[in-house]
Each structure stands twice: as structure tokens, then as C-alpha cells.
Amino acid sequence: MTNTNRPFVPLALSGIVPPLVTPLKARDQLDHSGLERLLEHVIRGGVSGVFLLGTTGEAPSLSYRLRRELIRQAVEIVDRRVPVLVGVTDTAFVESVSLAEYAAECGADAAVLTTPYYFPAGQTELLAYVQNITPLIPLPLMLYNMPGLTKVWFEIETLSVLTELDSIIGVKDSSGDLDYFRRLCGLKSVRPDWSIFIGPEAKLPEALAMGGDGGVAGGANVMPAVFVECYNAIRADDEATLRSCMQTITGFGEIYDIGKYASRHIKATKSALSLLGICEDLPADPFNPFLPPERQRVAEILQRIGVLSAA
């Protein structure tokens, strides 16, 4: 590992950045044609970037080999049309650095790092962790608050200290706590260049009203143009278009209620993409795809909101 100490090109992000699903053909086998169709689909939809290897991308369930294959292929397909952000979170410090170095070599635009999971870190430990790892990551770095899965928050006081690190460019918050998000946006008084993104897609209007810059919305894998239109309507104060878009987004969100396990969010998103003919619906182990009854319910929801044509 080396610290390049190179200056970072500012990367100001806003708009809709889908946390890309990872299309799979089989266990540990990337669906290359599905990946290309998916990337073309979201780019045509007007997204402002793509985020690889996040929660929706099932990153912790993928082999290191497959993660690298995905990064290389995606960066090549995107071909600089939009920024590519790469999740580098790992339980091992050196693996996060190694993946970030590989992403930089491939031409990715930024790395994304959440709190290390399994062993919960205290805020003093977390602060030192980010301070130690940031100089070793040769890309602009976005922090990712995902306490529902990592069991650890980036507390506002910790982030306030981390504003001193120039190569950190912002935060994605998936906590769903709008009071936390409001306080997070308050850090722009110190770092006006930070990009602050909301994760839960139904909260996009409230998040932007608080000073947020955009959304990392899983549903934008399936209907990117709707989320982009929603974002644009909020910025333009177009209440009629916003209401229409939010009605579609809220209706789409019903697919996340199908199934009884937490993995239903990933299963539902991949099922929807499969129904649209974009990529396979196979999730990474240990999960199974939706069975026909659940898949039919996804299809009915997509048909009701006009995303899928009736058979």
C-alpha cells in the first residue's frame, strides 16, 4: 500500500445515482450482457452516476475476484459518460485499500466507504479508522452511513472532525432518520463542497428540501427516468410533476413488501429487472430468487404503475 499524496480533482455530485445491482449468471459468475444492458438502461434514464458494490449490489456476498471483474467491466462500459463510484467496504482494512487501488487503476471516479461491520467500532475507533485509511485510498472518498446493517453510525460529531480531510467529498445516508439527515446537511457550513445523498427513495423530496444533493435510490435501477424526473421536478418547483413521480415511486415501493426476509429488497429489485428483460434475477448466496407467486406480484405492481406492459 502506498500513499500517493496526489491532489484530488474535485468531484461534485448531485442528482440520482443508482446503487447498481450486480447481475449474476451463476454462483460467482458475472452476467456480462446483463451488466451492459443495465448500465445502458440507467444512463439512458439520465442518472448522474452509478454506484457499484453497495448494499443493493450485494458487495459483501461477492468474491474479491468477482468484485474486481465487475469494476473493470462497468468502468469500460460506462466509458466516462457518468462518474463511477465503487464501494470498497470490507471487514479487513487492507482489503478495502486494495480494492480502492484496483478501482483507481481501472478508472473509477470515487470510492465509497461505510463503517466496518461484524465487530462494532466505537466512535473514537471509527474516527481513527477513517483518518488512517483515507490517505491510502487513491480516489475521492464518499462515506456511507448504513447503521441498519453495520450496526454503527457515523455520528455527526465524528463527521464534523472528518470534514478536515480534503479527499472526503460527502456522505450517503441510508439511516432513514431525517433529523440526522438535517444535521448532516448542516456540515455544509464547514464543507460546502460536500455532496449529501439520501438512501431511502421515498424520502427524496424531504431530503432535498433540507439541503441534500440527491438520492442513491435502488428503484433507479428499474425506472431511472422516473427518479431523474422527480429530482428535476423538485429542483424546478414543479409540484404537479413531483406528485405524479412520487405516486409512481410510492407504488413501486410496494415490491419491497413482497417476501418475508430482509433480502426481499434485493430479490424484488432483481425480479423487476428480470421482468423487464434487463438482467437475470439470481441473487448471490445464500439468497434465492423469488418463486413464481412472488414474481407475479412484482409483475402486477409494475403493470399497475405503467413500468411493465400487461401480458
Image (tube, rainbow, N blue to C red):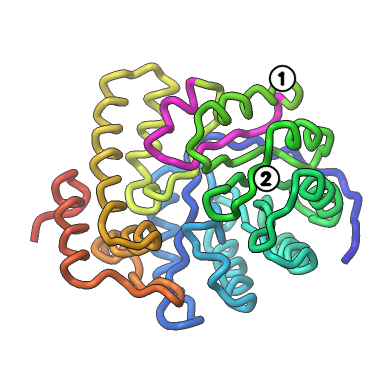
Magenta region, residue range:
192-209
Q: Percent x, y for residue 16? A: 47, 40
Q: Is residue 246 visible?
A: yes
Q: Is residue 106 visible?
A: no
Q: Which residue is mark 1?
A: 189
Left or right placement of residue 194 versus residue 172 in this view: right
Left or right placement of residue 131 versus residue 243 in this view: right
Quarter in which the C terminus is drawn: bottom left
Label 1 sits on what residue type? Ser
Nearer the observer, 103 or 59: 59
Question: Which residue does the image show at 68% across and 37% down from the upper left?
Answer: 155
Cα separation between marks 1 and 2: 18 Å
Q: Percent x, y for residue 33? A: 41, 72
Left or right placement of residue 60 versus residue 194 in this view: left
Image quadrant where residue 90 sits: bottom right
Image quadrant where residue 119 sits: bottom right
SS of the residue at dot 1? helix
Question: Which residue does the image show at 28% across and 38% down from the upper left?
Answer: 250
Disc 1 residue crowd, few under 14, some 14–19, many 20+, Cα 10 Å: few
Question: Which residue does the image show at 41% across and 27% down from the upper left?
Answer: 205
SS of the residue at dot 2? strand
Label 2 sits on what residue type? Met
Q: Percent x, y for residue 143? A: 67, 45
Q: Which residue is mark 2?
A: 142
Left or right placement of residue 118 versus residue 22 in this view: right
Q: For the residues labelled 1 and 2, say whether their Cβ atoms are less than 8 Å apart.
A: no
- 33 w.r.t. 247: above or below: below
Nearer the observer, 164 or 129: 129
Along the polypeptide, which appears first: circle 1 or circle 2? Answer: 2
Question: Which residue does the image show at 73% across and 60% down from the upper left?
Answer: 104
